[in-house]
Image (cartoon, grey):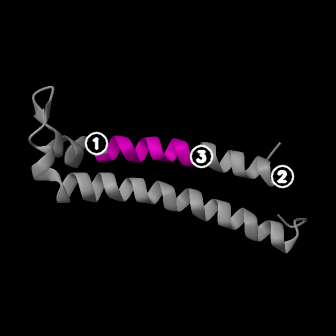
Amino acid sequence: MSDQSSGSGEAYWKANLRLMLACLSVWFVVSYGFGILLVDVLNNIRIGGFQLGFWFAQQGSIYTFVVLIFIYAIGMNRIDRKFNVHEE
């Protein structure tokens, strides 16, 4: 980033923030929304014998977090290539 102009660095940071906020929003909705706020509504749905709200509280938020890690890594690699700050 040292050879980048300040405008390009600012655009890079904004792209990074957009990706991070999108990932955190999904994580918040799944872990807090589905696991706590909407648990009673989701418990009316059963998948494989388990209540969906319980599943989100116990397993779904963890699976979602792991998937979001991969999405963030792939997204950051794309942003790095776009702003030419990727590693060779």
**Residues shaded magenta:** 61-73
Q: Label 1 amino acid?
A: Gly
Q: In terms of image quadrants, where is residue 13?
A: bottom right
Q: Magenta includes 62?
A: yes
What is the number of the mark on residue 73?
Answer: 3
- Nearer to us in this view, 52 or 57: 52
Q: Residue at x 47, y 46 (%)?
A: 68
Q: CA distance from mark 3 to mark 2?
A: 16 Å
Mark 3 touches mark 2? (CB < 8 Å)? no
Crowd class of label 3 (few under 14; some 14 to 19; many from 20; radius 10 Å): few
Which residue, as the protein is rendered here, is positioned at the far bottom? 6
| Picture mark count | 3
Q: Position of residue 69 (x, y in %)?
A: 50, 47
Q: Label 2 amino acid?
A: Asn
- Looking at the picture, does residue 14 appear above or below residue 63? below
Q: CA distance from mark 1 to mark 3?
A: 20 Å
Which residue, as the protein is rendered here, is positioned at the far right? 3
Q: Position of residue 35 (x, y in %)?
A: 21, 53
Give SS at disc 2: loop
Query: Which secondary structure type mostly characterizes the magenta part of the structure?
Result: helix
Q: Label 3 amino acid?
A: Ala
**Residue to which mark 1 is pinned:** 60
Q: Quadrant of the N terminus?
A: bottom right
